[in-house]
Image (tube, rainbow, N blue to C red):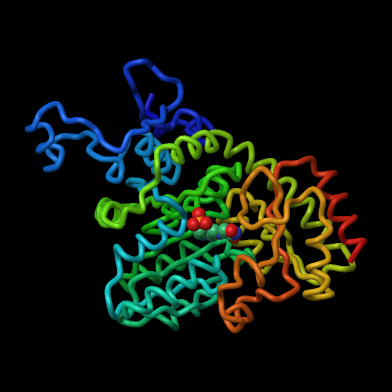
């Protein structure tokens, strides 16, 4: 039976192409930096690409290869390239595609570092970037110039969970020869496959839902086509931003339960969002599963579920937000997201502190905004925890 025909949950368990001589049921950790050649000709053939095999772990390694292969299948793409972190994946994608004078259009409210890297690092090499509300397609259209090379979309965006129409955005971008890159971290391939909707590159911080257990950092890129795959893989190799075999092993172990974790955490998230929306101390709740979310209909169409990331704004602003953070007892006060454990944090002073105050304001990242990553705990404990913390505000 062709693996392509298997259902998503089955592919999470059996989606890796891996065989060893002992019949290992899980992919072993190939803890080696280098691989011996059978003879000089074999080594030369591997370097010349005339034979398939492994040379050196910065270039590739069977454990990492297995994860790359599985993610390419799950994201319905050509090939996967694993990185040391999500930021390494993003930077390598930019480095592979852009050159001096090029222009990037990006979603404005994205993970802080994903924005800062363009504004403060790539700007040094003469690359311009414009940050717009990509949920409004005309804002994309109005900012395209003859130098625009990449449209970078984060949907749902971090932290305000705005949704961008990937299909429409890709159509406009492709008419203008622009490469579409989608950060699919908040959805994971369980909820959304951007390549099917027209994206050229999909990437993840695998630190989040893909691994799901808050115990390893990592990143992955999956491209739709061979050409971008080769460019980005070369960038990974030459910048040494590769994943390591231990990371790959842990991520594959976490990935097996992705569907179960996503189902449970998004069920919890719906209940939490409804609770928060009806709470008198909360001004606004951002969750794509609420009918009050401006892109609720789009989320319903584009995603196979609403995910488990929620943001909400406290009526009492900064002081109320801090009070709440300091009083939760079940949710962990920590950045990161997408794990089995519920995490709470304050974007303005934490994940998005590196953005300028003006950029935060444009992106609705106010001082009273809290981000809540819903885990798989019992819902009653999460609700009581929020209730008792809100009582203290
Ligand atoms: N993309 C998104 C959407 C993210 O949320 C993050 C990290 C990254 C990329 C970068 O991935 P990393 O290099 O950390 O693996 N987001 C974080 C957050 O919201 N809190 O801590 C990290």
Pick the residue in front: 65 or 40. Answer: 40
Residue 99 sits in quarter: bottom left
Q: In terms of image quarters, where does ligand 1 lie?
A: bottom right
Residue 61 versus residue 393 in the image, above or below: above
Which image quarter holds the C terminus? Answer: bottom right
Q: How many marks?
A: 0
Residue 6 versus residue 268 in the image, above or below: above
Residue at 41 percent across and 30 percent down: it is: 29
Query: Furthest residue to the right?
Result: 391
On screen, residue 336 versus residue 234, left or right, reads: right
The reply to whether residue 195 is visible in this rendering is yes
Q: Residue 217 at x, y = what percent? A: 51, 49
Residue at 44 percent across and 83 percent down: it is: 142
On screen, residue 19 versus residue 270, left or right, reads: left
Query: Furthest residue to the left?
Result: 41
Residue 336 versus residue 123 in the image, above or below: above
Residue at 81 percent across and 61 percent down: it is: 326
Residue 260 sits in quarter: top right
Residue 302 sits in quarter: bottom right
Which image quarter holds the N terminus? Answer: top left
Residue 391 versus residue 5 in the image, above or below: below
On screen, residue 115 versus residue 157, left or right, reads: left
Q: Residue 37 at x, y = what percent? A: 16, 30
Residue at 51 percent across and 71 percent down: it is: 107
The reply to whether residue 184 is visible in this rendering is no
Q: Residue 81 at x, y = what percent? A: 35, 48
Q: Residue 125 at x, y = what percent? A: 32, 77
């Amino acid at each position: 039976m062709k693996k392509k025909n298997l259902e998503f949950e089955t592919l999470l368990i059996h989606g890796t192409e891996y065989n060893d001589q002992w019949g290992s049921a899980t992919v072993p950790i190939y803890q080696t930096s280098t691989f011996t050649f059978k003879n000089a000709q074999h080594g030369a053939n591997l370097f010349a690409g005339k034979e398939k095999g492994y040379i050196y772990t910065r270039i590739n390694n069977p454990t990492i290869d297995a994860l790359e292969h599985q993610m390419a299948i799950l994201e319905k793409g050509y090939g996967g390239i694993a990185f040391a972190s999500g930021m390494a994946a993003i930077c390598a994608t930019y480095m592979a595609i852009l050159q001096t004078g090029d222009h990037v259009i990006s979603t404005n409210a994205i993970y802080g570092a994903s924005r800062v890297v363009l504004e403060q690092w790539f700007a040094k090499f003469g690359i311009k970037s414009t940050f717009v509300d990509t949920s409004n397609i005309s804002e994309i259209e109005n900012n395209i110039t003859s130098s625009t090379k990449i449209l970078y979309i984060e949907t749902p965006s971090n932290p305000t969970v705005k949704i961008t129409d990937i299909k429409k955005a890709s159509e406009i971008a492709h008419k203008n020869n622009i490469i579409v890159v989608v950060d699919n971290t908040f959805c994971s391939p369980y909820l959304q496959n951007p390549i099917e909707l027209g994206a050229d590159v999909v990437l993840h911080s695998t630190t989040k839902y893909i691994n799901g257990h808050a115990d390893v950092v990592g990143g992955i890129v999956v491209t739709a086509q061979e050409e971008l795959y080769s460019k980005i893989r070369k960038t990974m190799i030459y910048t040494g931003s590769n994943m390591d075999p231990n990371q790959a092993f842990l991520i594959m172990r976490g990935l097996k339960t992705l569907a179960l974790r996503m189902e449970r955490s998004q069920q919890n998230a719906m209940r939490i969002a409804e609770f928060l929306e009806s709470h008198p101390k909360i001004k606004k709740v951002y969750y794509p599963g609420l009918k009050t979310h401006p892109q609720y209909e789009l989320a319903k169409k584009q995603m196979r579920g609403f995910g488990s990331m929620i943001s909400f704004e406290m009526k009492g602003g900064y002081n109320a937000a801090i009070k709440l953070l300091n009083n939760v007892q079940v949710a962990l006060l920590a950045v990161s997201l997408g794990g089995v454990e519920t995490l709470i944090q304050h974007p303005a002073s934490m994940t998005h502190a590196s953005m300028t105050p003006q950029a935060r304001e444009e992106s609705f990242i106010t001082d009273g905004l809290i981000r809540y990553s819903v885990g798989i705990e019992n819902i009653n404990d999460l609700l009581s925890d929020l209730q008792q913390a809100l009582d203290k505000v």
